[in-house]
Structures are given as C-alpha cells and as structure tokens.
Amino acid sequence: MSRQTFGLNLDNLPQDPFYPQENPRGPSFLDTAGCLCALQVTPAGGAPEPAWHCVGDQSVGVYTVRNGRWFKTLNGVGNADGPVYDGSNPPDTENPMRWLSGALRDSPGDAGLSVEDSACTGTNNTRYSTSFYEAAQQINAGQYPLSGAPCLRVGAVPIEIQPLQSWQDDGCRPGFLCENNTVNSLPQYCPPLGNCQQARLAGFTCTFEGKNIGMGPFEPVICQAGHYCPTEENGKVSRVCPAGSYCQPGAATPTPCLTGSRCPEGSSYELFLIPLIILIIVDVLLVMGMIVYKVRRRFQDRQANKAAAAPARPPLAHRGMSSVRAQVTGYRAISDDTDREMLPTSATYTPRRTDSYGGGFLAALDLGNSQSSVNARPTSEQLNPQLMAFVSSMRRATDVTNFGLSFSYADLSFQPKKSSKKILQNVTGSIDRGTLTAVMGGSGAGKSTFVNVLMGKTKNTGGTVAVNSSPDKLKRYKKVIGYVPQDDIVLPELTVYENIVHCAKIRLPQTWSRADIESHVESVIDCLELSHVRNSLVGSVARPVISGGQRKRVSIGMELAAAPMAIFLDEPTSGLDATAASSMMSTLKAVARLGITVIVIIHQPRTEIFDLFDNLILLGNGQTIYEGPQRQVQDYFEGMGFGFPAHSNHGDVVTDIITGNGRDYKRIGDISTDSLIANWSSHRLATANKERPASSIMSNTGMYAAIKHRGAPLWKQTWLCLRRAMLQQWRTKAAFLAEMGLAALAGFLLGLAEHSKKGILFVGTFNDPYSILSTAVDFKSAPELALLVAIAIGLVAGAPGVKSFSEELLMQRREAEAGHSRLAYFLAKVLAVLPRMLFACLHFTTLLFILTVPIINWGLAFLVNFLYFYCIYGLASIISMVVRREDAPLFATMISLIVAILSGAAPPLAQVKDWHMEWLWRASPGTWLAEIYFGQLVSPFGYLYNVESAARGSGFHLDWVWRNMGVLVGIGSVYRVVAFFAMLFGHRRRR
C-alpha cells in the first residue's frame, strides 16, 4: 500500500524515512543517517552470499538498484528471508563496500555516491527502525500509518524548511533539538494541532508529558528550559543542565553561574545570592550600630545627668527664697533662684552674681555705666574672663583693637524694576561704630527695604554708602557683616554647638587653627549663656528641643562666631515673650558696648527695650522721619508740638506718631506722615554740618586685606559642608530607614509581579530557516520591566531627592549672603546623598533580581539602576529649587512618573520615531535605561532569535550599553547644573 492510497503525493513531499516505500522482503532497519538497510542475496556469480544494502533515498527501491553502500554480514552467512526485525546477523560497518563491475568491492571513498547515500552508516538506530516497523505493520493492516506519518495532524502535508545544502553547511541550528533530522530526513514544518496552535499563539511551545514536541517527527523543537542541546552533537540530544549552570529555553550551551549563585541541576535561571547576603550583613550592621550608638548615648547622658545633679551645696545664706521654703515644706530646693535659661550649668566660666545684669554679654552693661558717651568702651581690666576671651578672639580676627564699622549713606532710593513709584527715597544719615541702632516704622514704611539697600542686597537702587568714612559698597564687607533674619534659620538636626562651630570654621580667618576656632566658639556660647544647652539639638519650630529665646540666641551666635564688625537683625524679638525679648535686646546692647555695630529692625518695642537703643532711624512712606540719638527723639517731636504722656511707653508713642496716628499727642496741626517727612528734611538741612564721631579702626585698604583672608578655601568648605550633611542624615535615621524600607518594598513587589516569567523576558522569531516554527513574539516584557523599574525608582527617590535641598534653602541663602561658597555647599549636598542612593539601590536591585531572575549581569544592572537613581535625585533637585517646599515632593513624584512613561515601552519608541518626537523621549533618562535593559535581555539570544527585527520593532539599539550609561551620567549631571543655577538665581523665598 503506497502513500497515494492515503492521498499523499510523492512529488511534493520531503523524504520520510519512517514511511516504507515498499514492503520489506526480509531483515531491514534504518541506520543513524535515516538510510534504509535491507539484507539481500548478492546477485553475483557463484554461491549466493547475503549482504546488507543501504540507500538514502527509499524511493529508488532498495531491492531494485545496486548503488548505495553495501556491508557484508558479521557472521558471513545468514537468512535473507527472515523477519523484518531480525538483527541476528548485523552488517560489518568497519568495511563498507560498493557494487562495482558486477561484484562487491572495497569502497574507494564517497566518489560516485549521492549525498544521501554517502551519509549511510549501516548502524541500526533502533528508535528509527521501530517507527519504520510499526508503519509497515499499519500499512499492511490497511490502517493510517501514524508511526510513519510526516505530521501528527492527519492528512497534513509537511514543508521542508531547511534545504540539503544548508543542512550540510550549518546542521541543526543552535538552540534546537533535531533528534530525527539527517541528510535523509531534513527539518520540516507541519501544521500544528489545535491545542498546540493555541499554545503557540499564546507564546508557548507545545509540550507533551513535560517535554517540548514538534508537530511531526522531523520538525525541530526549541531546546527545553533546564536543558541544553550541544551544537557539537548537531542538536541530536538534549542534556540536563549541569549543576553550577543554568539553561534558558533554546540553550545551546550551559551558562555558567557566578560564584555565590544557587544553580542546582536542571536550572533554567540563576539565583545570585551574594547581593542578598551583603544586604543582610549591611542591614544587620546598620541596625546594630544604631543600637550601640543609642545605648552609649543613653549611658553618657545618664553619667552627665548624675554629674550635673550633684553640685556642691551652697551655704543657706547664699541660697534664694526657695531654700527657705524647702526647710519649711520639706521639698527639695533648687540650687538658686536664677532663670535657668539665662545661666549655663556647664559653662567654661561661671559668672559671679554680684552684678545687676548677670553673666555672658550682659556683664558688659555694668561696665563703664558712668560714661556718658555711647561710644565709650569698657577697658580690658573691666572685662570678666568670658568677655575677655570673646574680645581677644574678635581682635585677632579683625586685626584691630576697636572692631566696629561705621556707615554713612546719602539719598538712598529703591525703585522696583516694573514700577514707576519709588519705595525708598531721599534716605540720608549715618550709623556710628559700636552703637545699637533701631530702624522703626509702620508696616510698609520701608524698614526692610532700607536695610537691604544699605547692605547691597537689592538692585535698581540709588544713592551712596560710605564705610568708615570711605565711599564703598557693603557687599564687599559681607564676610565681616552678620545678618540675622527674622525667622530662626538654624538646622534642627544639629546641636547648638554644631550650628555655631560650622559657621565659625567656614568664615573665620584661614590662618586660625582648630583650637583657636573652638576656643572662639566656646567663648561665644558662654557669652550667649547657652552652655547648658550646648549639646542639645536645636529642633524645629514644630518640634522644638530648646526654647524660642535660645533658638534666637543660636541664630545670633552663628553670626558672632564669624567675628563680625557689624550685625543687622530683622525683628530679633519676634515670637518671644516679654521677658525673653527684653533679655535678647539687653544682650544685643551688650554686644554693641563691646564695639560691634548692631542695627535692628523692630516694631513697637517695650519701654525697657526702647531705652536700650543708642540711635533711631524712623521711616515713613520710604523716607526719613527722624535719624539720631534715641535720647533726643522726645525733644524733637515735642518741638513739633507732640506731647509725651507721663509714664507712657515712648516706643509706642513714637510708633503712633510716625505712622500718622499721633492725634492723641497733638491736638492741633498736621500729623500726617508727609508733614513729618517734610519737617525732618528741613531739620536735616539746618543741621547738615554737625560733626559725626570719626572711626578709629584700620583703613579700608588694610581691611580689604583682612577680609581677603577670611573664610575657608573651597575644598575645605566642601569638606565641612559634607561632614555636616552626613551628620544631618545620621540624625534623621528614621527617614533613612523608611527610604530603605520603601526601596526594598518596591523591589519586592516589582519582582513578585515578574516572578512567574522565570527570567524569560524576551521571545522573538526564530532565525531562518526555522522562523516558521516561531511562537507568538514577546517584545514588550523587556522594555516593560525597564518601565516598572523607572517608575519604582521615581517613587522611591523623588521625595527624598527633594528634601536634600528644599528643607534648607533659607539656610543656604543666609550662608551664601554671609560669604559661604554656594558651589561648596551644592557639591557637598550632592556627594552626601550618594551613600543614600547606594543603599536604596542595593535594597531595590537585590530584591528585584532575586524574584525576577533576569539574565542581566547583576553588577551591570546595579550600576544602571544607580545611575537612574542619580538622575532622579538630580531632577528632584531642580524641582526643590523652583517649587514651594510643601508642593515639591508631590511634583517630584509626578515628574518622575512622567519621565518613566517616556521610556519607549508604551508607546514603543519605534512608533515615537514615526511621530518625529524621538528627541523628547531621548531627553528622558527613562529611554536610556530601557534601552540598556532591552539590549541586555535581547542580545544574548542572537543565536536563536532574529534580534535585529526585535530591535527595529521596538526602536532600541542593542549595543549601546556604555553609550547609554554615559548619557545617564550626563543627564544626571545636567540636572544638577540646572539645579545649581536655579539655586544661584532663584530669589523666591519659600517656607
């Protein structure tokens, strides 16, 4: 029975060795090359001798032709009429023969043999032969020859997919199992069965009992996951992947696992455990370090408290009334009745309480009270050790004995750029060295504008300014002029000492040693009476650790630590109660008595505060109403017809008068602000020739030289800011741990979502000639993984990246105005977050790869993810500079999400190119990240899939790994450059 019986046309079918072309007449088998070998009696003369005849092409008739290979039997005799499966007398394969000139002769080689015949080996392939025998039986029984059918689908016609020449040149393609394919059974394609067709459309290979199967005996199948098909064996066998290696579907050779990986026998992916071990060790060490630090800190605090709680008990006569009450009531008495905020408990110098003001700077108010001049200074012999230490370090810093500055100004004015009206105009006057001068006025009177113009902080100004009687700009003196803003701008994560000493190290002369700087800082802390809270954290306004008055003193101490010659303060009593405000102004008065020029902006001071002022500058509508000694202001306004009620607060009276609300003090006449301005203008002209005390400090030339040596060099400022930033991060351990936990959670959830793929994140079309065997392609998993990675990193790093700068922009601006290097600060903040980024990336990447198990090298993936963290932190830095602090975290998260979406995953980058908008996607770091992931997940399969078509379909390049990394570094760096310039030129103050 022939194939035609079953509707099969021999002319258009590839050869099928399993299908008998004619009924076997005796012992027969198929050899390893698919040749049909039949035992026959040789037609030579003499005694008939049985021999094995093997032909590659069964259609020529093994019993008809004489060409092909011949083999004598091993036993020399045998029955050629035995059963088809009789193998008792196999061929002698060691001596192949040919039929030449009517007789069997030794073979001279393959000359004259067809390609099919030359492949014959004469070695029985029992598996081939079994199919051949079963097919013969089925044909003889009139059944469909299923065992010899070319396709599993009944009636299906196979298609030869690899021609003979290709097979001879290349053999079975790498990554495929060609178990039945030979020269005489070339690779074929068969239409799949219904369920297998569905599997292929879903991207799966058809399997049976856990093994990949083809749709016909001669259809190649992709090598099974966990197995490899060696190319040196021409894909004939599938071997289990050995331990220490892993084999993804289509593996031609096992991929060695890295040291520290878990790869048991039959692994289809690598489980790299070293990063997880490192992560666990690092986390354990961090937690243990924090615990040890906390325990040590508690022990040290307990020891300090014990030491502080056991002072020498003073005699009863020297104790306050609380001691007397203690004797009566039995309650424990405190050491004295002193305000504990005003007296340090651990100061380097403990002042005697025999004076009326107390210790610290306040002691200066008791010295030289008999002197009538405001410029009179206490002598060195009159100073207590605290003040002497401060004055000595001030003299060293300024290289002068009298270290104040005097200012004179004429016709100061300010007109906003887009306004036709001047906010400040015709302001003329002077400020003497070593005086406490108050700038007063109603709301909108121009107080802050006046100070900003005087200090050179504002553009579009007019007028002249002289320092120490020499025309100059105060901006040149910013290293020796302090400015204390209204808000207490201090770093809450640092202690009182750390806030002050940082400013000292940055701004004091470069020639000072560390011991000199620390000695000066200690004297400032002692004089400000902050010694008892020296090592206390400052805390924030929302979560204070020290009192409001102490925070204000810390803010002033940060300026005094720089040894200034003059200090400007904006509303130094704001937010303080009456007692703390009075104490604060007394301290400033004492500072002025020591020679430092102090200028304060103040609104409605109390009587005791008003009496402390040496001079007043009263403004209204941006012009001068009065400028001169405070003790003469009453006489001046009484000369204009105003009366000061007895026992009244002269500060309130003056404020009412200059704001145009002085009718209660002048019943008749003009009380308007304009009339006050006009009257002062006339008065000033009449007294224009009055003499001002001359300054006795160094010439401006000498001062320039001193100023030039003020401040640490750039590298040292960078180092100091870096140490401070690292200390801040250490003090905010909860935020750090939360960020690490979020990074780990993001990596875990993302890995869990991709875990089911077992690292198979790309499926393409098979390389020719097996492309027709391809399943549904998967070009999306690789870029989608990159998209999810970009989104996760954006969520993890966006908000923390904002906090790097947004929380302390006001502090940065304050420091920059005082002469700190903005570049040093910025570089330090950028460097300080690198360890934070490193730890976050370690947590994220480790858990992601433990569950996702992609074929990307872990070290490379970690570097790529770290660079993307670098980009997101840089992007967040820009946002922190241009968006309000309250809104910046949300904006950073949203912008990071947008950047991730522009990664080329959806819509595909190839489609974006059609829109001619690739430039926009290329501006996003997400695209460069996705291109690296795509290339690393796709390129290794170039031997198996047509990766070039995948690259064209996605729009990515496969070999731009290091170029992409360089671009990521560039983008992250450009973000930081933009952020730096935004910090330089962004003048918007945000709270």
Image (tube, rainbow, N blue to C red):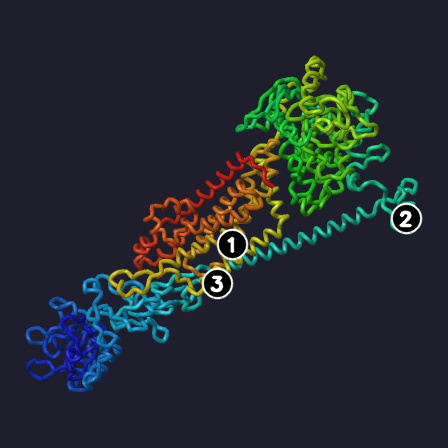
Residue sitting at x 12%, y 77%: 61
The first of marks 1 and 2 along the sequence is 2
458 to 313, vertically: above or below:
above
**Relative side of 694 to 217, left or right:** right
For the residue pair 426 and 510, the one nearer the viewer reads as: 426
Q: CA distance from mark 3 to mark 2?
A: 68 Å
Please tell me how crowded label 1 is: few (under 14), some (14-19), or many (20+) other residues with Cα within 10 Å.
many
Residue sitting at x 68%, y 47%: 543
Judged by depth in the image, the label closer to the viewer, 1 or 2, is 2
**Relative side of 925 to 681, left or right:** left
Residue type (three-letter) at the residue carrying disc 1: Leu
846 to 799, vertically: above or below:
below
**Relative side of 752 to 330, left or right:** left
Identify the residue under disc 3: 752
Where residue 928 appears, as percent x and y from the top left, is 41, 48
Residue type (three-letter) at the residue carrying disc 2: Ala
Position of the N terminus by quadrant: bottom left
- Whether residue 275 is visible here, answered yes or no, is yes
Where residue 817 appears, as percent x and y from the top left, is 60, 32
Residue sitting at x 19%, y 63%: 165
Residue type (three-letter) at the residue carrying disc 3: Leu
The first of marks 1 and 3 along the sequence is 3
* Dot label at residue 326: 2
Q: In terms of image quadrants, where is residue 65? A: bottom left
For the residue pair 112 and 307, the one nearer the viewer reads as: 307
**Relative side of 279 to 760, left or right:** right
Q: Indicate the secondary structure of the residue bearing disc 1.
A: helix
Q: Indicate the secondary structure of the residue bearing disc 3.
A: helix
Q: CA distance from mark 1 to mark 2?
A: 61 Å
For the residue pair 888 and 383, the one nearer the viewer reads as: 888
Identify the residue under disc 1: 842
- Whether residue 598 is visible here, answered yes or no, is no
